[in-house]
Image (cartoon, rainbow, N blue to C red):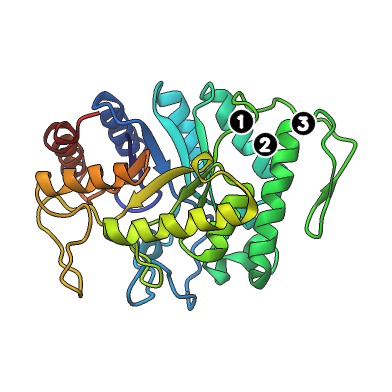
Amino acid sequence: MHYGFSVPNGGPLATADAILAIAGKGEALGFDCVVAPDHIIIPKSIDSPYPYSETGEFASVSAIAGECLEMHGMLSFLAAATSTLRLITSVMVVPYRHPVLAAKLLATVDVLSAGRLTVGCGAGWMEEEFGPLGAPPFAERGKATDEFIAAIKELWTSETPTFEGAYTRFADIAFAPKPVQKPHPPIWIGGESAPAMRRTVRLGDGWYPIGNNPRFPLNTAQRFAGGVERLRGFAEETGRDPASIDLAFYAPRYNESEAQVLDDGDRQAFTGSAEEIAADIAGHRDLGVRHLIFNFLNPSLERTLERMEFFAADVRPLVGD
């Protein structure tokens, strides 16, 4: 099992010193990867419902402060500050950037990190962010995402990149350097819906859902097992071997201080005692998950580091290899 943690892109810990402290602690404790979120601007008025909240409200520190560090810049910074951590876009909102630019930014991170990049991808949810960025129409974000991923792969793998699509086209160009990883950095597709699963089957190397989407809840091992079963069904329909799809999982409601009880009486996965969290990890591992990402962030840097230390010292040993 590979374990990861988040770094903040906004709020009191979004400083160079704090980000370095969190990343350095994670690497020293033996974590495997670090993830960075993607927002470029925060609209002052947001009517789009946030998919990962019961109320639909986007109440992150970034939304409150109106600030967000750019994801690729953060990962390049972390590439220089670390030596073993994989660097994961979590997730890159694909329509926000022209695919030629995105391919170059991502290839740069992969080259500068000596091949440590994993590209988490999503179609986006905040309509108000699309317009100021000159992105394709929000209603067409799924089609644009599919096309942009295909275009990025073309740039990464072809010596004579050529692409003709509805949203982008290019020819007669050189694209170098290519990513270090071959044929390209792993592409994980975020999202819990059927379209996200089908995108995973068509274009992804891995599926990377978040556990607390109220419409598609994956907040217990049993519910996650149902999601994996659906994904594998989509793969079999298209003739793809389900075993060829890597499984990652982001657990944003990790809580080592108390168990959280769901409306149906079940316990929220990855909350409770060290023993309960370790059992959740083992259960997800048995379902095929190879990458688990946790959110240890707290407004206090000291508390954030303490939570990481607790996981490494008290939870992880109970799981074993």
User: In the figure, 80 relative to 252: above or below?
Assistant: above
Q: Is residue 307 visible?
A: yes
Q: Which residue is labeled 3 in the image?
A: 175
Residue at image mark 2 = 104
User: Is the N terminus in the top left, top right, bottom left or bottom right quadrant?
Assistant: top left
Disc on res. 66: none
**Residue 311 placement (x, y as % from top left):** 18, 38
Residue 223, image x, y percentages? 32, 62
Q: Is residue 97 left or right of residue 267?
A: right
| Residue tagged 1 | 108
Q: Residue at x 13, y 49 (%)?
A: 276
Residue 150, position as x, y percentages in the image: 71, 47
| Quadrant for the C terminus in the image | top left
Horizontal side, residue 84 vs residue 121: left or right:
left
- Which amino acid does the dot numbered 2 rest on? Lys
Circle nearer the N terminus (1, 3): 1
Name the residue: 41% across, 45% down: 248
- SS at mark 2 in the image: helix
Query: 73 or 143, which lies in front?
Result: 143
Q: Residues within 10 Å of mark 1 (few under 14, many from 20)?
A: many
Q: Amino acid at mark 3?
A: Phe
Asked if marks 1 and 3 touch (Cβ < 8 Å), the reply is no
**Picture residue at 52% right of the left edge, 46% below the top:** 242
Q: Position of residue 211 (x, y in %)?
A: 34, 58
The reply to whether discs 3 and 2 touch (Cβ–Cβ < 8 Å) is yes
Quadrant location of residue 133?
bottom right
